[in-house]
Image (cartoon, helix red, strand yellow):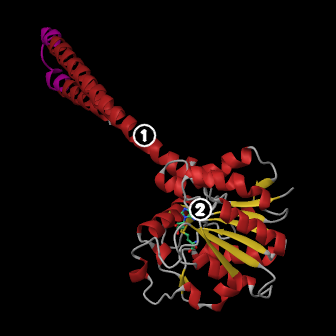
Amino acid sequence: MMKLLLLGPLLFVSVWVHTAIAMESHEPHHHVSTLMMKVQRQLEAVQTLQESIKKKLEEVHAVQSNSHTTQQAACVGNTYSLDTQSSFVMKDEIVTMNNGHSIRMDDILYGYDWVFESRRLFSVGSWLGVQSQQDPADLVVIQQLLWDIKPKVIYDIGTNVGGSAIIFAHIMSQYAKPGEAIIVSVDPKHYSINWDDAAKQLCPKCTAVDENPLWNDYVQFVQARSVEPQAIAALEAAIAKYGGPVIISVDGWHDYPEVYEECVTFAKYVTVGSYMIVQDTKLDRIFNKPGPRQAVYDCLVNNTNFVIDKSREVFLYSQHTDGFLLRVR
Ligand SMILES: C[S@@+](CC[C@H](N)C(=O)[O-])C[C@H]1O[C@@H](n2cnc3c(N)ncnc32)[C@H](O)[C@@H]1O
């Protein structure tokens, strides 16, 4: 663009000079010097024009690069959210589809996180008629994990209305009889109340968890915060009675301090070869602040007994990326 602007006037002058010379080539000799002076003046005019164009372009570039910096700054914020904080498996892959669109894997997966949250999809699902806040992909992974480990004790932090508890109980019922294994499910509020007011409309056919016999057969509900003494006592009593393997599912209050405290407190109860599942690590990115995922990282700094098991993220999409913590020693 700049070259065009600079070359344009030059081209014009050169055509003008050639035409003038051609026209005056048969005139007497003294006319040539007059002509040369005219050309000289025109060249000076072009030079002045060039300089003013150059100045103008520099001004335009300055404005452009300023706005570029602003755009980049905005982008850096996004990049922080979209890339730096991404922990999806294969997040950097570019997926080219048969409609010709190419899109980053991270945008597909993180985009779904946004859809899930903004449309309150966490309240539309149910298991055996009980409203469950589990994401379907993670639910299959957790089912696979439970089936592999066959835990005798699951500490279910965050009962809500019993969704995760009934799922765990259902799977448990396939490998253990009532009285052989247990889920200790804890929540400071009663399981008859859903924290999400919209859940009733979103899952109109959902029923109360205690109408299902699995609840009575496999679940011990403790109305308390996960780290309160009566909740810990129930967990320890369950371990004393049923033994291991033990799984801890962290799905209570999803703020950094609570999750960090739960990770530190309950790590010792997880048996070797089993898992702590820290749910909703996606929230760090959604809220753009340290949350469950950062709590995991910080918790593991001082605990080398655990590794983050990425092999559990088989569907690539997970709301608990870096949250499947395998106890290795
Ligand atoms: C995301 S919901 C749990 C969803 C449930 N696990 C499911 O899959 O359907 C979070 C629940 O954690 C509970 N909660 C909040 N703080 C808690 C704490 N300190 N200990 C245990 N549960 C807590 C809330 O009352 C809420 O019911």
Compared to 289, does 102 lie above or below? below
| Residue 24, position as x, y percentages in the image | 14, 21
Is residue 269 visible in the rendered structure shown here?
yes
Residue 127 appears in the rendering:
no
Q: Mark 2 vs ligand 1: CB under 8 Å?
A: yes
Start-end of magenta stretch: 20-34
Determine the secondary structure under disc 2: loop
Q: Magenta residues: mostly which secondary structure?
A: helix
> Pointer 1: what residue?
72
Q: Residue at x 51, y 60 (%)?
A: 107
Q: Nearer the viewer, residue 148 or 317?
A: 148
Q: Nearer the viewer, residue 13 or 233?
A: 233
Q: How many marks?
A: 2
Residue at 77 percent of width and 69 percent of height: 237
Q: Are marks 1 and 2 in contact (CB under 8 Å)?
A: no
First in sequence: mark 1 vs mark 2? 1
Q: Position of residue 222 (x, y in %)?
A: 63, 71
Tell me the CA gap for discs 1 and 2: 44 Å
191 with respect to 170 (left or right): left
| Relative side of 262 to 119, left or right | right
In this view, 289 is above or below 33:
below
Quadrant into which the N terminus falls: top left
Residue 275 found in image quarter: bottom right
Q: Residues within 10 Å of mark 1 (few under 14, many from 20)?
A: some
**Which amino acid lies under the numbered mark 2 shown in the image of this protein?**
Arg
User: Which quadrant does ligand 1 occupy?
Assistant: bottom right
